[in-house]
Structure formats: C-alpha cells, structure tokens
Image (cartoon, rainbow, N blue to C red):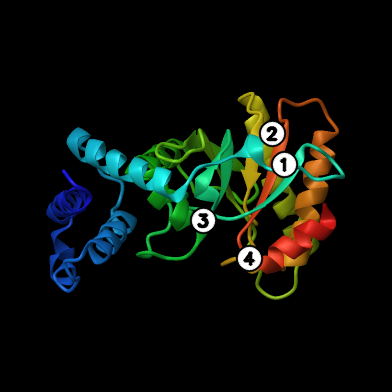
C-alpha cells in the first residue's frame, strides 16, 4: 500500500467500528492531507475496543514512517545546562524525542484526549503512539477501578514513539489563585514520574510543562517548581542521568533558560 491507501484502509476499518461517524466522514475531501486529518480524528474519538492485528500492522507502518519523516531527536545529542550536566532544555515536539521516557500531562481518566485533533500534548502523544496506548491505559484504569489521582504517575510502553515509555501524570487544575496544595500537587507530579522512572532503572526522562496549558498553572511558577523538584531528586542516588525540560513556546523557553 502507498500512504493514501494505508490511510483509507484504516479509515474504512474505523468507520465499520463506529458507523455513527460515516456521515461526517463524507464531508472530508479526498486528498491525502484531509484524509490523514480524518484518520487522526477517528483515532482520537475511538473508545478502547479490541485491536485487530492487520489494522495495527498498517497503523504501525504509517506511524513509523511519519516518525522518521518528522525526524527523531536523540537525547544524547542535546546540549546540557552549564549549571548541571544532567539537565537539558529542548524546545520542540516531545513526540520526536528518543529518550527512555517522555511525560504526558494526562487527565484523570488517563485514556488520552477524545477531542478530534485537539492541540494538547495528551492528544499529540496518543496520536503519535497509536491506538495501543489507549488500550494499555484502559487496562490499567480497569485494574485501578477509579480515576487517576492528581500528583501520581503511571508507566506504559511508547509503542510508535521514539521514546521507550510514556509516564502519565495528572497535574492540578487551577481555578483562581494558586494554593499551597496546588504547588504540592505539581511537585508531586514531577517527583512521582522520577521515582517511577528510577524504579524501572531508566536513565533519561523528558518532562513537558505539566499543568500549564489546559490546566492554567502559571508558567513561571510551574517552571520554578519543576526545576526545584528535579534538582532535589537528583541529589539522591538514582539511575537517572538526563532530565530534559521540553518546551514548545518561546515564552517557556525563556523561563527555563533563565532557571538553568
């Protein structure tokens, strides 16, 4: 199959699973870019369902090719902070990083973002990893039997991401002024991810800016907490050798650059 054939095959399978979307799918143009957006939309809204091996083979081939086209960024090649050689600031798409684990700022359902093509990092990570990630998250949540508490962390495979693993953590949602409890919960997100990574003998981890997007934690204060918590953790014996602070916006890059 060429790429458009792969995309259209995957769309066909998903529409058979979710026939309620067939009418909306007809509104998408037939060009490759539009069909790829339709595919991502359908993958985003698909609930956890059994996964077909043939579907996964085609999906993985498509996502693997897209991963290589975007360009994989090796953590080992990134310049380190002058203040501490274990700390790295990198601006870009976290789904391009080849690292032991990337951190996903998740919601308490821990199933990824169901809003088609939404711009949040949760959507980006699930879209690049493939449907296996939602499936594994669903099984973890079924075993847990309740929503994911704020400040804790779960580890899954990375599937079609360059990263070996994904660490999912739920940050505090800010409504009004930031409280002391909010600060403690955000610090717990960073600490829980680091502890879980160390439990699995991981050596490198990339953090997104937890809670600063849809959850409205002030960027400067969130960065202060992130850097302080990571530095404190690295003072203890640990397997972790590299911590990447991954930012997307220039504003966040300036904040972390000053801190590091």
C-beta proximity under 8 Å, tags 4 and 3:
no
Task: Say whether residue 71 is visible.
Answer: yes
| Label of residue 107 in the image | 3
Q: Residue at x 63, y 32 (%)?
A: 197
Mark with earlier residue (4, 1) = 1
Graded by Cα atoms within 10 Å as few (under 14), some (14 to 19) or many (20 or more), the crowding at tag 3 reads many
Mark 2–mark 3 distance (CA, rounded to whole Å) = 20 Å
Residue at 27%, 59% (x, y): give it. 36
State the image coordinates of residue 221 (x, y, percent, origin top left): 78, 63
State the residue in front, 98 or 232. Answer: 98
Mark 2 sits on what residue?
195
Which residue corresponds to mark 1?
A: 191
Please tell me whether mark 3 sits on a helix, a strand or a loop: loop
- CB-based contact (under 8 Å), mark 3 and mark 1: no
> Residue 2, position in %: x, y?
19, 47
Tag 1 and tag 2, C-beta contact below 8 Å:
yes
Q: CA distance from mark 4 to mark 1?
A: 24 Å
Residue hosting label 4: 249
């Amino acid at each position: 199959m060429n790429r458009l054939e792969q995309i259209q095959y995957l769309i066909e399978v998903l529409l058979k699973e979710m026939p309620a979307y067939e009418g909306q799918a007809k509104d998408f143009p037939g060009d490759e870019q539009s069909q790829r957006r339709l595919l991502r939309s359908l993958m985003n809204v698909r609930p956890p369902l059994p996964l077909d091996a043939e579907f996964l083979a085609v999906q993985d081939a498509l996502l693997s090719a897209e991963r290589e086209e975007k360009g994989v960024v090796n953590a080992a090649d990134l310049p380190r902070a002058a203040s501490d050689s274990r700390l790295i600031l990198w601006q870009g798409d976290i789904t391009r990083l080849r690292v032991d684990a990337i951190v996903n700022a998740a919601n308490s359902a821990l199933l990824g973002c169901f809003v088609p093509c939404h711009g949040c990092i949760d959507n980006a990570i699930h879209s690049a990893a493939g449907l296996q990630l939602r499936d594994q998250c669903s099984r973890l949540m079924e075993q847990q039997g309740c929503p994911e508490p704020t400040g804790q962390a779960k580890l899954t495979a990375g599937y079609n991401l360059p990263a070996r693993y994904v660490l999912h953590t739920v940050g505090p949602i800010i409504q009004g002024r930031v409280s002391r409890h909010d600060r403690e919960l955000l610090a717990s997100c960073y600490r829980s991810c680091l502890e879980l990574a160390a439990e699995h003998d991981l050596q490198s981890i990339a953090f997104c800016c937890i809670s600063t997007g849809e959850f409205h934690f002030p960027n400067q204060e969130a960065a202060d907490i992130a850097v302080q918590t990571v530095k404190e953790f690295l003072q203890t014996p640990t397997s972790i050798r590299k911590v990447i602070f991954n930012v997307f916006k220039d504003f966040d890059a300036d904040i972390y650059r000053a801190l590091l």
